[in-house]
Image (cartoon, rainbow, N blue to C red):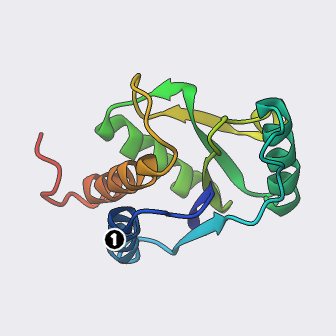
């Protein structure tokens, strides 16, 4: 079983790249972990947001294995505190041999096709974050979840 973070678009700022590398290394101690960046999707600059989302969805749906457990990181998703999220992650990892893919959409969010394919929607906050910065925020929460599962002292409760 593998845990993956997929996202659309390149990391433009050095601090984003550094944060992603920092947590990628830490997560490798807990699970088979990978990051998949998709930055070469052909979308016209003047296309409507709905068309952007549709093109992105069709591209991603061709790549997502049918057997994967897909979790969309989405403002319409359910919110959990860190402990509850760690319990959900632990249960998912123990119950299924499916790979888990966490997906961060592009600037316009997700098309209905991806919502239909998703096994779960997860919201990290009521606030809006850029699709770049949320990558680091989510990786920190994923790392925190693994430290909670392992009973380590990173999470102070």
Residue 114 visible in the shown view: yes
- Towards the viewer: 37 or 98: 37
| Number of residues whose C-alpha sits closer than 10 Å to that of mark 1, classed few (under 14), some (14–19) or many (20 or more) | few
Residue matched to label 1: 18
Tell me where residue 140 appears, x and y as whole percent: 32, 54
Tell me where residue 130 appears, x and y as whole percent: 47, 41
Please determine whether, in this image, residue 105 is positioned above or below residue 28.
Answer: above
Q: Residue at x 65, y 62 (%)?
A: 99
Q: Residue at x 43, y 36 (%)?
A: 129
Among the 4 quarters of the image, the one containing residue 49: top right
- Towards the viewer: 14 or 46: 46
- Towards the viewer: 53 or 60: 53
Tell me where residue 74 appears, x and y as whole percent: 57, 33
Instruction: Tally the marks.
Output: 1
Q: Could you tell me which secondary element the residue under label 1 belongs to?
A: helix
Q: Residue at x 79, y 60 (%)?
A: 41
Residue 66 visible in the shown view: no
Judged left or right of residue 58, residue 102 is left
Among the 4 quarters of the image, the one containing residue 73: top right
Please determine whether, in this image, residue 143 is positioned above or below residue 2.
Answer: above
Tell me where residue 64 appears, x and y as whole percent: 79, 58
Judged left or right of residue 13, residue 99 is right
- Towards the viewer: 11 or 84: 11
Among the 4 quarters of the image, the one containing residue 96: bottom right
Please determine whether, in this image, residue 116 is positioned above or below residue 132.
Answer: above
Where, quadrant-wise, is the C terminus in this rendering?
top left
Q: Residue at x 73, y 57 (%)?
A: 68
């Amino acid at each position: 079983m593998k845990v993956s973070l997929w996202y659309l678009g390149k990391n433009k700022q050095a601090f984003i790249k550094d944060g992603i590398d920092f947590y990628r290394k830490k997560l490798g101690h807990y699970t088979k972990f990978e990051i998949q960046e998709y930055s070469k999707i052909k979308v016209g600059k003047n296309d409507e947001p709905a068309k952007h989302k549709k093109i992105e969805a069709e591209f991603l749906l061709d790549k997502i294995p049918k057997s994967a457990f897909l979790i969309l990181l989405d403002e319409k998703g359910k919110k959990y505190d860190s402990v509850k999220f760690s319990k959900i992650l632990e249960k998912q990892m123990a119950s299924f041999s499916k790979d888990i893919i966490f997906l961060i959409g592009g600037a316009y969010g997700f098309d209905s096709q991806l919502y239909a394919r998703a096994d779960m929607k997860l919201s990290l906050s009521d606030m809006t974050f850029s699709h770049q910065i949320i990558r680091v925020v989510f990786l920190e929460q994923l790392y925190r979840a693994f430290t909670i599962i392992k009973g380590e002292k990173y999470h102070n409760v």
